[in-house]
Image (cartoon, rainbow, N blue to C red):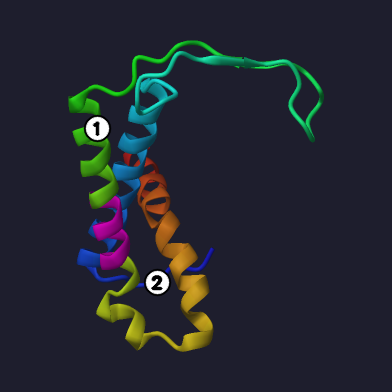
Amino acid sequence: MATYDFPEDLRAAQLRLHQTWAEYEALGRTLPWSVEPSEGWTAPKVLYSDGEPRSLPPSPGYTDVQKVEVARLRRELLELSAVVSTHPYWETVEVGKRVDQRMALKHVHELDADADRAEAA
Protein backbone atom coordinates (compact mmCIF):
# COMPACT_ATOMS: atom_id res chain seq x y z
CA MET A 1 0.00 0.00 0.00
CA ALA A 2 1.28 3.45 -0.87
CA THR A 3 2.14 5.79 1.96
CA TYR A 4 1.20 9.46 2.06
CA ASP A 5 2.23 12.42 4.16
CA PHE A 6 -1.07 13.10 5.89
CA PRO A 7 -1.28 16.10 8.23
CA GLU A 8 -1.03 15.14 11.89
CA ASP A 9 -4.44 16.60 12.79
CA LEU A 10 -6.07 14.53 10.03
CA ARG A 11 -4.30 11.38 11.24
CA ALA A 12 -5.40 12.13 14.81
CA ALA A 13 -9.02 12.66 13.75
CA GLN A 14 -9.01 9.39 11.81
CA LEU A 15 -7.56 7.53 14.80
CA ARG A 16 -10.18 9.04 17.10
CA LEU A 17 -12.87 8.03 14.57
CA HIS A 18 -11.62 4.43 14.70
CA GLN A 19 -11.52 4.49 18.49
CA THR A 20 -15.00 5.98 18.79
CA TRP A 21 -16.39 3.41 16.36
CA ALA A 22 -14.84 0.64 18.46
CA GLU A 23 -16.43 2.12 21.62
CA TYR A 24 -19.79 2.33 19.86
CA GLU A 25 -19.60 -1.30 18.68
CA ALA A 26 -18.56 -2.49 22.15
CA LEU A 27 -21.45 -0.63 23.74
CA GLY A 28 -23.85 -2.04 21.16
CA ARG A 29 -22.87 -5.59 22.10
CA THR A 30 -23.98 -4.92 25.69
CA LEU A 31 -27.32 -3.28 24.92
CA PRO A 32 -30.73 -4.96 24.99
CA TRP A 33 -32.21 -5.64 21.56
CA SER A 34 -34.90 -2.97 21.99
CA VAL A 35 -34.43 0.68 22.92
CA GLU A 36 -37.82 0.74 24.63
CA PRO A 37 -39.08 -2.03 26.95
CA SER A 38 -40.69 -4.84 24.97
CA GLU A 39 -42.43 -8.06 25.86
CA GLY A 40 -40.55 -9.98 23.19
CA TRP A 41 -42.17 -12.06 20.50
CA THR A 42 -42.22 -15.31 18.58
CA ALA A 43 -43.02 -15.65 14.89
CA PRO A 44 -43.80 -19.16 13.68
CA LYS A 45 -42.43 -18.51 10.19
CA VAL A 46 -40.74 -15.53 8.62
CA LEU A 47 -41.46 -14.86 4.96
CA TYR A 48 -38.51 -14.90 2.57
CA SER A 49 -36.28 -16.71 5.03
CA ASP A 50 -35.30 -20.27 5.81
CA GLY A 51 -38.73 -20.82 7.34
CA GLU A 52 -37.40 -21.26 10.85
CA PRO A 53 -39.36 -19.70 13.70
CA ARG A 54 -37.88 -16.52 15.12
CA SER A 55 -38.19 -15.18 18.62
CA LEU A 56 -36.74 -12.55 20.88
CA PRO A 57 -36.89 -12.57 24.67
CA PRO A 58 -38.40 -9.70 26.64
CA SER A 59 -36.25 -6.57 26.63
CA PRO A 60 -35.93 -4.15 29.52
CA GLY A 61 -35.06 -1.38 27.04
CA TYR A 62 -32.11 0.95 27.34
CA THR A 63 -31.45 2.73 30.60
CA ASP A 64 -31.27 6.52 30.55
CA VAL A 65 -27.49 6.25 30.92
CA GLN A 66 -27.29 3.91 27.91
CA LYS A 67 -29.44 6.25 25.81
CA VAL A 68 -27.19 9.19 26.67
CA GLU A 69 -24.04 7.21 25.85
CA VAL A 70 -25.42 6.00 22.51
CA ALA A 71 -26.38 9.57 21.60
CA ARG A 72 -22.96 10.89 22.65
CA LEU A 73 -21.08 8.31 20.59
CA ARG A 74 -23.29 8.83 17.53
CA ARG A 75 -22.79 12.59 17.77
CA GLU A 76 -19.02 12.14 18.10
CA LEU A 77 -18.95 9.74 15.13
CA LEU A 78 -20.83 12.25 13.00
CA GLU A 79 -18.54 15.10 14.02
CA LEU A 80 -15.36 13.11 13.44
CA SER A 81 -16.60 11.84 10.09
CA ALA A 82 -17.19 15.44 9.03
CA VAL A 83 -13.75 16.52 10.28
CA VAL A 84 -12.03 13.76 8.32
CA SER A 85 -14.05 14.05 5.12
CA THR A 86 -13.96 17.87 4.90
CA HIS A 87 -10.36 18.38 6.03
CA PRO A 88 -8.57 21.00 3.89
CA TYR A 89 -5.94 18.40 2.98
CA TRP A 90 -8.34 16.77 0.51
CA GLU A 91 -8.38 19.96 -1.59
CA THR A 92 -4.63 19.49 -2.18
CA VAL A 93 -5.12 15.97 -3.58
CA GLU A 94 -5.88 15.40 -7.25
CA VAL A 95 -9.54 14.37 -7.54
CA GLY A 96 -8.72 11.02 -9.15
CA LYS A 97 -6.40 10.10 -6.28
CA ARG A 98 -8.63 11.01 -3.34
CA VAL A 99 -10.28 7.61 -2.97
CA ASP A 100 -6.93 5.80 -2.84
CA GLN A 101 -5.61 8.26 -0.29
CA ARG A 102 -8.80 8.08 1.78
CA MET A 103 -8.46 4.29 1.90
CA ALA A 104 -4.81 4.63 2.88
CA LEU A 105 -5.73 7.05 5.68
CA LYS A 106 -8.13 4.48 7.12
CA HIS A 107 -5.19 2.07 7.53
CA VAL A 108 -2.37 4.48 8.34
CA HIS A 109 -2.42 3.60 12.05
CA GLU A 110 -1.95 -0.07 11.22
CA LEU A 111 1.17 0.89 9.28
CA ASP A 112 2.35 3.04 12.21
CA ALA A 113 1.88 0.11 14.59
CA ASP A 114 3.78 -2.21 12.24
CA ALA A 115 6.65 0.30 12.04
CA ASP A 116 6.73 0.65 15.84
CA ARG A 117 6.90 -3.14 16.24
CA ALA A 118 9.71 -3.35 13.67
CA GLU A 119 11.68 -0.66 15.51
CA ALA A 120 11.23 -2.46 18.83
CA ALA A 121 12.50 -5.76 17.40
Q: Which residue is mark 1?
A: 67
Q: Position of residue 4 (x, y in %)?
A: 40, 71
Q: Quadrant of the N terminus?
A: bottom right
Q: Which residue is mark 2?
A: 4
Q: Position of residue 48 (x, y in %)?
A: 79, 35
* Mark 2 Cα-neighbour bin, 10 Å: few <14, some 14–19, many ≥20: few
Instruction: Give me the residue at 31% from left, 35% from top.
Output: 23
Front position among marks 1 and 2: 1
Instruction: Give me the residue at 30% from left, 24% from top.
Output: 62
Mark 1 residue element: helix
Q: Position of residue 74 (x, y in %)?
A: 29, 47
Mark 2 residue element: loop
What amino acid is found at the position of numbered circle 1 in the picture? Lys
Q: Is residue 78 magenta?
A: yes
Q: Quadrant of the C terminus?
A: top left
Q: Which residues are magenta?
A: 76-83
